[in-house]
Image (cartoon, rainbow, N blue to C red):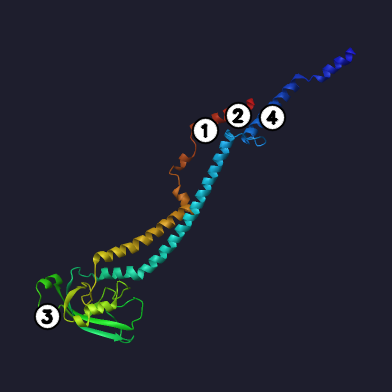
């Protein structure tokens, strides 16, 4: 009986090397399980409110919501910018024949900003395309002429303000240009309500033949005489029609290119460091090696 009890005790007790290896492996497994449990934020157990895990989940959700809002805002902004760029192009193309071209023609004609004295000497009213080769006033610059008012004037370069202070006898005036065409503006056309040919004909036509009135002549083409001219308004409309569409188009295309063009993004975010500075220095390598050795020692402890 004594021998059997002694044999039992000797077989049940493990040797010391085997015991230390099992203990080390068990400690490592418990450490890894505890870390995985913390990282998974107690996924297999109940999450208590007010704990760090709940705060981390809330922060992550808020971050995702903010990213979603930013993506939506970027999408709708991109749509608006694309629409603005397209409308800017069409607006500029529309303004070229109606604003830009007349304004440039007016600048080239070089009208005298000081009004001179004109007198209407003839007014012809005609109907039919054959009889209306030109018109002093036309409503719509692209419409065909079926009715037209043709006014002819004489003008002298005496300023109209001086003529009002000291009127002259029309028969004794030496006219600088005689029997020349008279236009409502530099293009001879316009659009309602600023241009009304009936009002224009009543203002300068049959009932006012022989009456002096202010007009503007072209210093580049002396035979051209118009009734309306303003250097400030002409330059104002020209600058607006050139700047606004082009600036909107440039801003829209620039922002869209920065957001969606990889080449532009790389060019904008390009580092200014020299090629040699992109490699780590000796001090950075040594510090990195020290950091790696410390990490390896801590892992070996476990």
Give the percent coordinates (x, y) of residue 210. 16, 81
N-terminal of the pair, mark 1 or mark 4, is 4
For disc 1, the marked residue is 285
Looking at this view, is 162 or 246 the one in front?
A: 162
User: Going from the N terminus, do you reach mark 4 or mark 2 first?
Assistant: 4
Quick check: 11 left or right of 143?
Answer: right
Q: Which residue is mark 2?
A: 296
N-terminal of the two: label 4 or label 3? 4
Spatial CA distance of label 4 from label 3 is: 118 Å
Residue at x 24%, y 67% (from the top left corner):
230
Residue drawn where x is 33% and y is 84% of the image:
146
Q: Earlier in the sequence, mark 3 or mark 2?
A: 3
Considering depth in this image, is 73 or 97 the residue closer to the camera? 73
Q: Quadrant of residue 180?
A: bottom left
Disc number for residue 29 = 4
- Kindly state the secondary structure of the residue where label 4 is placed: helix
Question: Which mark is nearer the camera, 4 or 3?
Answer: 3
Determine which residue is flagged by label 3: 170
Residue 213 x/y as whole percent: 17, 75
Residue 40 to residue 135: above or below: above
């Amino acid at each position: 009986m004594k021998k059997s009890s002694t044999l039992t005790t000797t077989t049940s007790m493990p040797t010391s090397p085997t015991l230390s290896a099992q203990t080390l492996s068990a400690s490592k497994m418990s450490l890894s399980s505890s870390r995985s449990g913390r990282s998974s934020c107690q996924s297999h157990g109940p999450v208590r409110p007010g704990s760090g895990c709940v705060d981390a989940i809330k922060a992550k959700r808020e971050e995702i919501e903010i990213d979603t809002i930013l993506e939506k805002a970027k999408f709708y902004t991109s749509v608006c910018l694309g629409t603005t760029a397209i409308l800017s192009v069409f607006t500029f193309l529309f303004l070229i024949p109606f604003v830009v071209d007349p304004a440039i023609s007016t600048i080239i004609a070089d009208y005298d900003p000081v009004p001179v004295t004109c007198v209407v000497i003839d007014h012809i009213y005609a109907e039919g395309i054959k009889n209306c080769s030109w018109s002093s006033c036309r409503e719509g610059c692209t419409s065909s002429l079926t009715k037209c008012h043709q006014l002819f004037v004489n003008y002298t370069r005496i300023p109209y303000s001086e003529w009002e202070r000291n009127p002259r006898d029309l028969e004794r005036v030496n006219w600088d240009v005689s029997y020349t065409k008279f236009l409502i503006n530099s293009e001879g056309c316009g659009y309602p309500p600023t241009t009304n040919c009936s009002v224009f004909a009543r203002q300068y036509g049959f009932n006012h033949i022989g009456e002096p009135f202010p007009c503007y002549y072209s210093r580049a083409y002396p035979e051209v005489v118009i009734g309306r001219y303003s250097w400030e308004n002409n330059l104002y409309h020209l600058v607006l029609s050139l700047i606004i569409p082009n600036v909107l188009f440039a801003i829209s295309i620039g922002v869209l290119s920065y957001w969606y063009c990889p080449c532009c993004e790389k060019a904008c975010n390009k580092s200014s460091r020299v090629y040699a500075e992109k490699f780590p220095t000796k001090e950075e390598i040594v510090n990195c090696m020290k950091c790696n050795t410390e990490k390896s020692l801590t892992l070996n402890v476990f």
